[in-house]
Image: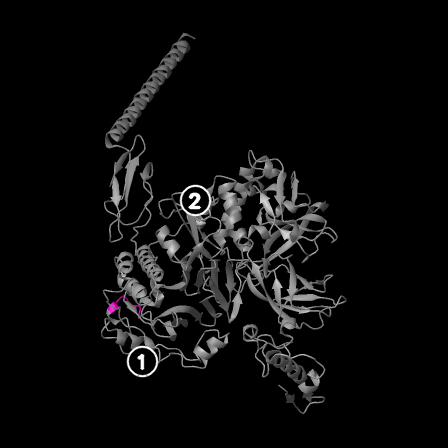
């Protein structure tokens, strides 16, 4: 193979004959091609420097170039990967730059989010390192690297900044008995405090232990409102980096005790006190009870009450945010199923057995995923062991709204949208003041009352599973075994598009299965979830780049959140409240879409027209409706009409197979004609297994996957997927709430459930009589039976009291009259004596 390339540029004549003339061996054509591309790219200036993410005329700097073998020769040197790819938003993570080499004399500067610069270094192996900075935001941020002391930033990557509460314990210093740290100085809490850390997170023999504090200044909701982390003082210097530190805390001096929120940092001792953005490991941010002033230790309850009253006055001056936050789900089942709008609160998770410190009596809490639009507020909903929502009017552990969403919200960086920190300042410290350090929760709950679920509306759900089978939002079930890429769901008003790719089960069976789902809402990142090679897990792509969930299970992306706790479970959440769950079981993908009521009357695609009416559910892309739901050929035509175009496709084509099959070829393969109905052959050896496995509702789908797909395991998975969907629909059924009932004054109530069918009973304290209803039941109309309950003084007691009062008054009058009479007689006698004396004299 001899090739020559010419161009008009200087020294552009390239002869591969001359290049390989001296090589005494046969060179594979593929290697020659790569070398040829390299020579041509270098000659024409086809470089990835400044071009990461782009496809150039002769080579590519796009993330797909690796699998397509089209990368420019310097791709790895300029479009860099890093390890680790994530760390605390407080900074201090040592980041290794992969694939690029540096000179020992290189002066590395790293720029995060196009604004914050930190100093890096080159190690003994000529590998570059960056140190992550303090960032007042979470999510992916850009990372640009300079090797000439900041003159040019020509290497590009990205960094995942993580909320301190969501960061895995192995990446932070751990407060041993964190409750003790945060209650220190209250009655009975004293002694030594201890913290531990993984020594590999700080590559130094000796370390400093420093306290940093967080505060917010400026008028709330003004342009001057800002937050800042500041170095306060050192707890110890030049300590051995042995992974643990203990000390006996003393009240802070020089006014530092005014800082009530902070974190302890462990950093190399060769840096001066409080040096920012150096390699370090941090504890989780926490209430600094252990360093508060002596006055707190002398009488913590009185100190906390003063703080609570001051917070109460501040809240009275701030605008109300509660009208714009979403209502809580009525039941724990709803809360755990509505994954598009609510997600488990990491501080109270029934799956992890957390103790729910801030919500005693509860077993599980969820948070509304999206912050409120204007105020960046959040909603937290908590439930007891019976699955009933707990309200603050009944319990200190009740559900509470938040002025600042714990997870923050775009554009971050300024209060109240700074992840975690703003929430601490406005919602958590005040809970310590009013509830945990003193017994004055009525102040707190006056401003953070639970919202019940009377305005909550469950989402509608649709699902794709098996070979593939569909259940629409309005409950229509059908099968469509087209080969190609199709629109599963499209909502024009919300600009939400969800597409699915169906591929043949294998080379011999005329049936397909879903292998990839791609989605986007408005201008959000494009998220694709597909079956990874080998069918052992799911792969998640963000804008055609594969995401790793090895370090973090939750990712804040642009206009979308993604949660992947395991390699077979992925949940995608959009700002509208739409959620997409993808589950992989036994090589079969199940995709569930959850849509809130705002989507009603505004959906189209293979998952139907969501309006509560199944008769008009299946609409062709040209507007006509399927007339016969039991006709497989008509259903096939319906499905085929929702094929996507290359222009609208959201998928990633990063292999020659995908390019040839779904990009260069028609999106719908008209040559692939599936089996439309289950063959009924008495001699089929799988009949018995199908009869045994496929029972109950949805058995037709199970039978199809066994008798057509020739796979009993797949049939079993299909049956399980269908039953799981039925359970999900059941969990999301609307629940009627009649709202909270208060106990009567001078009385009590029994029962804290306020849903349809619940009964609340009332009783009065001794000496009082109950008027109204002794018990009230919640009706399907959303109203309580009976009459309002009061505890009053009994009428006979009132008569006795009235008589006693009148008698007492009468006695007083008689005594007074007698006293006056005797005084008058005495005066009269005295005057008579005076007259006698005068006459005698």
Viewer-proximal residue, 738 or 829?
738
Q: Main secondary structure of the magenta part?
A: loop
Q: Which element is circle 2 on?
A: loop
> Which quadrant holds residue 162?
bottom right
Question: In which quadrant will I find the N terminus?
Answer: bottom right
- The residue under the point 38% across, 46% down is 390
Give left or right: position of 762 versus 147. Answer: left
Work out whether 168 lies above or below 463. Answer: above
What is the magenta range? 609-614
> Which quadrant holds residue 468?
bottom left
Question: In which quadrant will I find the C terminus?
Answer: top left
Mark 2 → mark 1, Cα distance in angstroms: 53 Å
Extreme residue in the right direction: 105
- The residue under the point 67% across, 84% down is 43
Residue of label 1: 622
Viewer-proximal residue, 451 or 684?
684
Residue 634 image position (x, y, % from top left) = 26, 76
Extreme residue in the bottom direction: 8
Q: Is any atom of residue 457 visible in this view? A: no
Residue of label 2: 397
Residue 33 image position (x, y, % from top left) = 61, 81
Viewer-proximal residue, 138 or 607?
607
Q: Which element is circle 1 on?
A: loop
Coloration of the structure image: one colour
Tell which circle, 2 or 1, labels the residue nearer the N-terminal end. Answer: 2
Query: Counting other residues with Cα less than 10 Å from the Cα at mark 2, is it few (<14), some (14-19), or many (20 or more)?
Result: many
Viewer-proximal residue, 101 or 563?
101
Residue 450 image position (x, y, % from top left) = 40, 50
Kindly identify which numbered label has been placed on residue 608: none
Query: Counting other residues with Cα less than 10 Å from the Cα at mark 1, is it few (<14), some (14-19), or many (20 or more)?
Result: few
Give the number of the mark in front: 2 or 1.
Answer: 1
Q: Is any atom of residue 699 visible in this view? A: yes
């Amino acid at each position: 193979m001899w090739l020559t390339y010419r161009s008009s540029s200087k020294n552009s004549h390239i002869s591969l004959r001359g290049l390989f003339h001296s090589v005494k061996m046969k060179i594979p054509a593929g290697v020659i091609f790569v070398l040829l591309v390299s020579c041509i790219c270098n000659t024409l200036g086809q470089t990835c420097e400044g071009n990461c993410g782009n496809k150039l005329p002769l080579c590519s700097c796009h993330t797909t170039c690796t699998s397509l073998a089209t990368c420019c020769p310097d791709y790895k040197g300029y479009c860099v990967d890093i390890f680790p790819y994530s760390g605390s938003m407080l900074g201090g993570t040592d980041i290794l730059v992969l694939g690029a080499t540096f000179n020992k004399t290189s002066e590395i500067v790293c720029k995060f989010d196009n604004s914050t610069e930190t100093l890096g270094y080159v190690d003994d192996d000529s590998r570059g390192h960056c140190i992550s900075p303090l960032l007042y935001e979470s999510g992916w941020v850009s990372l640009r690297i300079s090797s000439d002391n900041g003159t040019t930033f020509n290497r590009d990557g990205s960094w995942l900044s993580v909320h301190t509460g969501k960061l895995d314990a192995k990446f932070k210093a751990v407060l041993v008995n964190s409750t003790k740290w945060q209650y220190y100085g209250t009655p009975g809490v004293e002694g030594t405090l201890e913290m531990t850390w993984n020594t590999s997170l700080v590559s130094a023999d000796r370390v400093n232990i420093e306290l940093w504090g967080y505060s917010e200044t400026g008028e709330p909701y003004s342009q001057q409102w800002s937050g800042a982390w500041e170095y306060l003082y050192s707890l110890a210097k030049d300590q051995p980096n042995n992974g643990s530190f203990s000390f006996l805390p003393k009240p802070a001096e020089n006014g530092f005790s005014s800082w009530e929120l902070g974190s302890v940092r462990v950093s190399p001792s060769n840096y001066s006190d409080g040096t920012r953005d150096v390699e370090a490991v941090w504890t989780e941010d926490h209430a600094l009870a252990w360093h508060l002033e002596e006055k707190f230790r002398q009488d913590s309850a009185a100190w906390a009450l003063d703080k609570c009253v001051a917070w109460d006055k501040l809240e009275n001056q701030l605008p109300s945010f509660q009208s714009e936050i979403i209502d809580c789900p009525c039941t724990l089942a709803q809360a755990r199923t509505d994954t598009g709008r609510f997600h488990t609160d990491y501080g109270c998770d029934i799956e992890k057995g957390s103790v729910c410190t801030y919500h005693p009596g509860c077993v599980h809490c969820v948070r509304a995923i999206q912050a409120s639009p204007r105020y960046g507020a959040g909603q937290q909903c908590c439930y007891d062991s019976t699955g009933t929502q707990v309200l603050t009017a009944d319990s200190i552990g009740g559900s509470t709204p938040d002025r600042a969403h714990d997870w923050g919200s775009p554009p971050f960086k300024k209060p109240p949208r700074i992840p975690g920190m703003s929430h601490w300042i406005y919602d958590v410290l005040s809970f310590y003041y009013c509830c945990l350090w003193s017994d004055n929760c009525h102040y707190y709950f006056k401003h953070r009352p639970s919202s019940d679920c009377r305005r909550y509306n469950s989402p509608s759900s649709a699902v794709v599973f098996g070979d593939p089978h569909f259940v629409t939002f309005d409950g229509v079930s059908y099968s469509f075994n087209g080969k190609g890429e199709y629109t599963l769901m499209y909502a024009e008003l919300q600009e939400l598009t969800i597409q699915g790719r169906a591929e043949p089960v294998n080379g011999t069976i005329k049936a397909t299965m879903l292998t990839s789902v791609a989605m986007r809402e408005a201008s959000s990142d494009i998220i694709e979830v597909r079956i990874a090679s080998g069918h052992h897990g799911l792969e998640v792509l963000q804008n055609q780049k594969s995401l790793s969930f090895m370090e973090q299970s939750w990712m804040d992306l642009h206009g979308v959140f993604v949660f992947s706790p395991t390699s077979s479970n992925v949940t995608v959440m959009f700002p509208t409240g739409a959620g997409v769950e993808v589950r992989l079981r036994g090589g079969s993908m199940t995709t569930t879409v959850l849509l809130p009521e705002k989507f009603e009357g505004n959906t189209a695609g293979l998952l139907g027209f969501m309006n509560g009416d199944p008769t008009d559910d299946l609409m062709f892309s040209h507007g006509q409706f399927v007339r016969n739901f039991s006709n497989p050929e008509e259903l096939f035509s319906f499905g085929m009409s929702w094929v996507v175009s290359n222009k609208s496709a959201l998928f990633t084509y990063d292999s020659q197979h995908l390019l040839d099959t779904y990009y260069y070829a028609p999106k719908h393969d008209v040559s692939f004609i599936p089996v439309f109905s289950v063959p009924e052959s008495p001699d089929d050896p799988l009949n018995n297994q199908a009869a045994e496995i496929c029972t109950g509702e949805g058995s037709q789908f199970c039978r199809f996957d066994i008798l057509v797909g020739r796979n009993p395991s797949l049939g079993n998975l299909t049956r399980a997927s269908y039953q799981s969907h039925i359970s999900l629909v059941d969990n999301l059924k609307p629940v009627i709430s009649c709202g909270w009932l208060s106990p009567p004054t001078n009385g009590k109530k029994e029962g804290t459930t306020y849903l349809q069918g619940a009964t609340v009973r009332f009783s009065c304290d001794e000496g009082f009589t109950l008027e109204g209803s002794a018990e009230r039941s919640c009706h399907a109309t959303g109203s309580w039976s009976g009459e309002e309950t009061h505890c009053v003084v009994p009428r006979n007691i009132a008569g006795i009291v009235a008589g006693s009062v009148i008698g007492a008054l009468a006695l007083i009058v008689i005594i007074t009259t007698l006293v006056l009479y005797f005084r008058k007689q005495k005066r009269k006698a005295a005057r008579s004596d005076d007259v006698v004396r005068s006459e005698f004299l």
